[in-house]
Image (tube, rainbow, N blue to C red):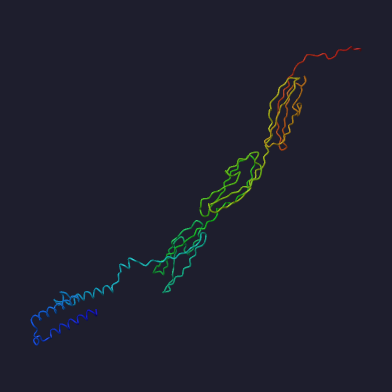
């Protein structure tokens, strides 16, 4: 601005001086006069061009462009760029809170009010109205919580990012109880296993329950220590219980039991056999008139029906069976045994 004003002052003084020259007292030759006039006009035109006057100087509007430029400069300096400010709002900072799974989130809030008004504030889920949250296994992740505070007139908000870190824990095997069964029974077993992290779990059970079903037999008696192993691929849990299979005596079996029919004078032979699945020693008893050896030689006076009792004893239990024995009568002719003199 100062440079413009100084230049204008120089032009005005120059024009004034030129106008005051007594051109009558000094006669310039015509050729020099023409040359000087041309030079003067050229210098004035150059000065006007530098000052930005141009044609406006000729018409008397010398200050028009200067005023416009001054106004434009003032507009550029004074007026703010509101659109630019709206396009780039200040980014709100988000506070971050970090906890591990299965831990408490407890936020303490301190809010001040210049008017000393009572401030009420609320939290968005998963936090409760007190700003608390008991996390569990499986809650790992990020949660954006909004905290709102109000004095009854104004409401202000604050964003809080709650980061819950994953904490892996081993699978949990439900308490196991000892099992008691008898030989011959079927045992079905399926352990109950949970994973706090909701991971996939692989469960293994030791023999004889590795298939989940155990069909016992007469040879299964005994005590078994069963191991249950649960794995989530990273951590393992194991637990034990006792399976007791009580011995159940298998009764001995008597074979070749059948009714017998003979004639008087014939020999009765009972060809009986015994077996025992428990491999117990079996004692076989046969009632009279046959006897324990199973052989009876009948006579001609033994005709009739007999109910023979057969007993098998393995030392634990006794099995009793009946056999009907029929001895048919055979009429024999008289037989002279002896002839002698009667002296009386």
Q: How many marks?
A: 0
Quarter holding residue 121: bottom left
Outermost residue toward the bottom in this view: 25
Quarter holding residue 292: top right
The residue shown at (88%, 12%) is 340
Judge whether 140 appears above or below 184 on screen. below
The residue shown at (60%, 48%) is 227
* Nearer to me, 26 or 197: 26
In what quadrant of the picture does the N terminus appear? bottom left
Q: Locate residue 262, reporting x and y percent.
A: 72, 21
In what quadrant of the picture does the C terminus appear? top right
Outermost residue toward the right in this view: 344
Q: Locate residue 239, reporting x and y percent.
A: 60, 51
* Nearer to me, 131 or 75: 75
Relative side of 246 to 23, left or right: right
Judge whether 96 appears above or below 275 on screen. below
Relative side of 77 to 249, left or right: left
The residue shown at (68%, 29%) is 255
The residue shown at (77%, 15%) is 332
Q: Locate residue 173, reporting x and y percent.
A: 57, 51
Q: Locate residue 200, reporting x and y percent.
A: 51, 50
* Nearer to me, 232 or 42: 42
Judge whether 111 appears above or below 216 on screen. below
Judge whether 326 appears above or below 15 on screen. above
């Amino acid at each position: 601005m100062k440079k413009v004003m100084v230049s204008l002052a120089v032009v005005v003084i120059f024009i004034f001086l030129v106008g005051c020259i007594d051109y009558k007292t000094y006669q310039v030759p015509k050729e020099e006069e023409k040359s000087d006039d041309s030079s003067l006009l050229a210098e004035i035109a150059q000065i006007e061009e530098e000052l930005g006057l141009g044609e406006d100087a000729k018409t008397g509007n010398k200050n028009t462009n200067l005023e416009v430029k001054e106004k434009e400069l003032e507009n550029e300096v004074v007026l703010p760029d509101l659109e630019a400010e709206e396009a780039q709002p200040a980014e709100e900072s988000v506070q971050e809170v970090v906890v591990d799974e299965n831990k408490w989130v407890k936020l303490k809030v301190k809010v001040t009010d210049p008017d000393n008004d009572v401030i009420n504030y609320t939290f968005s889920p998963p936090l409760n109205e007190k700003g608390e949250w008991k996390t569990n296994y499986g809650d790992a992740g990020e949660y954006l919580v909004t905290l709102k505070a109000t004095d009854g007139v104004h409401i202000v908000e604050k964003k809080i990012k709650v980061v819950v870190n994953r904490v892996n824990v081993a699978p949990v095997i439900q308490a196991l109880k000892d099992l008691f069964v008898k030989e011959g029974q079927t045992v079905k077993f399926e352990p109950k296993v949970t994973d706090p992290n909701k991971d996939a779990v692989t469960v293994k059970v030791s023999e004889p329950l590795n298939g989940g079903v155990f069909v016992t037999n007469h040879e299964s008696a005994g005590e078994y220590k069963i191991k249950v192993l649960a794995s989530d691929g990273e951590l393992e849990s194991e637990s034990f219980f006792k399976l007791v299979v009580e011995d159940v005596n298998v009764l001995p079996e008597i074979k070749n039991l059948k009714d017998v029919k003979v004639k008087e004078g014939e020999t009765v032979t009972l060809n009986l056999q015994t077996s025992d699945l428990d491999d117990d020693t079996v004692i076989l008893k046969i009632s009279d008139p046959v006897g324990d050896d199973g052989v009876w030689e009948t006579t001609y006076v033994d005709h009739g029906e007999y109910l023979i009792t057969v007993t098998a004893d393995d030392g634990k239990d006794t099995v009793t069976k009946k056999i009907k024995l029929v001895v048919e009568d055979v009429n024999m002719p008289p037989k002279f045994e002896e002839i002698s003199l009667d002296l009386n």
